[in-house]
Image (spheres, helix red, strand yellow):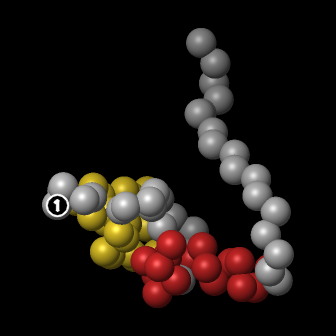
Amino acid sequence: MTDTQPALVVRQHVRANPDRVFDTWTDPEHLVNWWGPAGVECIHAEVNLQVGGMFRLANLAPDGSTTWIAGV
């Protein structure tokens, strides 16, 4: 058993300035335009960037089901 928490690391080279990338990942108005896999629509996004803040995203699947994703 280890004391470390699972981690996910994603790396992608993006040809954009850092401010634009930050806004795209953190501004709900941008998130709903790109979040989720093909065929899934992000219908709701909330982001609180303060320490301890939460995020919530809602994905609408083609079958009409909604999946909520949240974290701190």
Q: Position of residue 48 (x, y in %)?
A: 48, 76
The quadrant holding residue 59 is: bottom left
Q: Is residue 44 left or right of residue 29?
A: left
Dot 1, how many residues are within 10 Å of its Cα: few (below 14), some (14-19), or many (20+)? few
Labels in figure, total: 1
The residue lying at 37 percent from left, 61 percent from top is: 39
Towards the viewer: 61 or 44: 61
Q: Position of residue 40 (x, y in %)?
A: 36, 62
The quadrant holding residue 19 is: bottom right
Label 1, on which residue? 64
Quarter of the image with the N terminus is top right
The residue lying at 61 percent from left, 79 percent from top is: 24
- Secondary-structure class at tag 1: loop
Task: Say if residue 48 shows up in the picture.
Answer: no
Task: Say if residue 67 shows up in the picture.
Answer: yes
The amino acid type of the residue labelled 1 equals Gly
Q: Position of residue 4 (x, y in %)?
A: 65, 29
Q: Residue furthest top?
A: 1
Towards the viewer: 24 or 65: 65
Q: Position of residue 43 (x, y in %)?
A: 31, 74
The residue lying at 69 percent from left, 50 percent from top is: 10
From this view, report whether residue 15 is shown above or below residue 9.
Answer: below
Q: Is residue 46 left or right of residue 8?
A: left
Towards the viewer: 40 or 1: 40
